[in-house]
Amino acid sequence: MFSLCYLPTAGRLTITVIKARNLKAMDITGASGGTLSDGAFSCGSRVGSYEVSVRRLLAYICIYPHRPLLLVASTDPYVKVSMMCDGRRLKKRKTSTKRNTLNPVYNEAIVFDVPPESIDQIHLSIAVMDYDRIGHNEIIGVCQVGNTAERLGRDHWSEMLSYPRKPIAHWHSLVEHRQFCPLQSHPGGLARCGLCCC
């Protein structure tokens, strides 16, 4: 959920990232050193195996000699907001990283300077990312708001312009990067597509 507010006299566009819920789990216990693949793990004196399917992890139980250890799948999400114009990223900002949660609460404002004559030419690309200490941060999902966006993204933008100086909040669904990115054939979908701030 995020709110949009535009102040035409000041030429200031504010997006307040409020919270997210039910994010896709990307790590076991958060801040992982990378993406897991099928294989085996060692846990105390026991050895077990795990299986990873579509990078959705729920929980794995390792048995120690005297107590079970529950490893919970989670993510370390942050939100990256890019101001786009004609397929080019003009500016980007990001929120703080919330550790080990699938339901982060941010309440953080991100401000862009946008003159009134340019407001119809730009759009915002919002990507929820998973922070990883080692390797690349992963894209959990993306959405877009602006005149060129589809459905709710366009409606939210129009409502913001209709009610200047008033924050307008809506929930937005995230889509996978590959569904959103026109460069779907790129391995891993990590090319700069100009739409999703990757």
Image: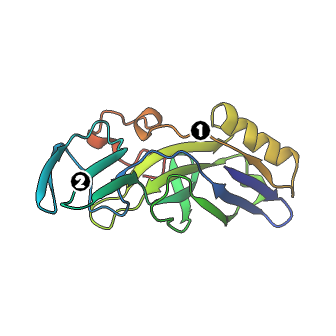
Identify the residue position indicated by label 1 in the image: 173
Identify the residue position indicated by label 2 in the image: 62
Q: Determine whether, in the image, residue 145 is placed left or right of residue 193.
A: right
* Total numbered labels: 2
Mark 1 belongs to which amino acid? Ser
Q: Determine whether, in the image, residue 89 is placed left or right of residue 48.
A: right
Give the image quarter of residue 83. Answer: bottom right
Query: Circle 1 — which element?
Result: loop
Is residue 195 in view? no
Tags 1 and 2 in contact by the CB under 8 Å rule? Answer: no
In this rendering, the answer to whether 148 lies above or below 94 is: above
Give the image quarter of residue 81. Answer: bottom right
* Front tag of 1 and 2: 2
Query: Circle 2 — which element?
Result: strand
In this rendering, the answer to whether 10 lies above or below 188 is: below
In this rendering, the answer to whether 158 lies above or below 164 is: above
Q: Position of residue 148 (x, y in %)?
A: 64, 37
Q: Determine whether, in the image, residue 108 is placed left or right of residue 60.
A: right
